[in-house]
Image (cartoon, helix red, strand yellow):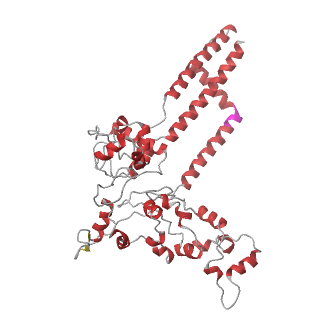
Amino acid sequence: MLLNHYASLTRRVVLMLLAISILSITAAAEVSADAGKKLFKANCASCHKLDKKLIGPALGDVTQRRTEEWLLKWIRNNAEFRASGDADANALFAEYKGSIMQAFPALTDDDIKSILAYTVEGDKKAAPAAAPAPGADAAAQAPAEGGNSPWLIYILGAFLLVNLVLLFRVRNTLKQINGENPTNLLEDVDFITRVLIANKRFMTFLTVVLALGFLYAIYSFLMGIGIEKDYQPVQPIAFSHKIHAGENGVDCNYCHSSARHSKHSGIPAANVCMNCHMYIDGSEVVDASGNLKYGGERSPEIQKIYAAIGWDPEERVYMEGYEQKPIQWIRIHNLPDLAYFNHAQHVNAGKVECQTCHGPVQEMEVAYQYSELTMGWCINCHRETEIKGENGYYAGAIDGSASISDRLVDRFHEEKITVANIGGLECGKCHY
């Protein structure tokens, strides 16, 4: 009976060790202060500091001022949260005189919790946090406290410790019954280590596992070089594609007109913005709760356009002798020099929608890189995308001969004709 109990305890201890290891790895993967630091620098640092107020409140003690649940809602979409009627959210909005904090729909809960973990650790390492801004968690796009409670791991650890103590006592009792001398933990560890090292099968298995793990880590690292998926920089003007392309239905090609005629889609000059914003200054824009966003004043973001191009909104004229300043937009999508990509070829001949590569731009409050844009991603698209035989390029005929579309149908016997079938996988198409 004692032997059975001993075996049962052994199995239980092994299972507990596995459970604690898995939970520890999961917790570490989900929330990381190091990852939070990168997210904070990319998304929050332009408006927030940990120890003092900048544009928004100091975030070093934000987790003491707001609950994690509240912060998650505020950071994800503060306008929607205010529209829900939350008193604290609306009070905070009023306290900062209607200053708009952008939404962060692309951040996951774990991303936000990682940022919060960084604010906590950073606050401990840095100088003491400045006086908390009232209610301030606001623009804390960053914060949401680091998430997973450690109590479960503590409880499992305590349970494991109790089982280990019982296991050693049972083992030593059995040894005394058999007339053997009891041993301590260090002797057991040494014995188990020697047995495992002497076991060739175990050592072979361990070597293979470690080698595969190392190779996978190297492979993952190398495959991530140069990939900027989800890159979402803070732009000099808070331009919302959701408002322009989504709510107002502005055609992508209206602003990015060169996409139809050139290799590059281009960034619109400020005079393109002025076609609309000569008349629309944002003073009548309302938020989700129906309140005027800027208290009836002009939008500070639209005023940045006026400042760049030299427009006087009061006199409604361009200022003479004004030294115009370019708007320094930050490029998001950037292919390596070794790869050739032509927007006009895809937009005109291919009739490819912008969303195919750029994602649901009409839903993006802040634009980000939606696709990986790797060679494998492009090749897969060429293999799956059917050519649009009805467009003018393929439907046209020269000197009465059959159109390109008809010739392709004859060649491939009415099968699905993809870009790959017309040379879309040839190396020289993109690399020359």
Figure quadrant of residue 146? top left
| Rendering coords of residue 41 (x, y %) | 38, 50
Q: Residue at x 71, y 16 (%)?
A: 4
Horizontal arrangement in the rendering, residue 276 relative to residue 23 (left or right)? left
Q: Residue at x 56, y 18 (%)?
A: 162
Is the stretch drawn in magenta largely helix, strand or loop? helix
What x and y, as percent, mark residue 179?
A: 68, 8
Q: Quadrant of residue 424?
A: bottom right
Q: Is residue 58 left or right of residue 332?
A: left
Viewed as shown, does residue 219 lie left or right of 327?
A: right
Establish if 189 lies above or below 299: above
Residue at image coords 43%, 48%: 80
Q: In this rendering, would 356 be left or right of 126?
A: right
Where is residue 65 shown, x and y percent of the image? 34, 36
Q: Residue at x 65, y 40 (%)?
A: 207
**Residue found farthest to the front:** 290
Res. 219 in view = yes
Q: Which residues are magenta?
A: 199-204
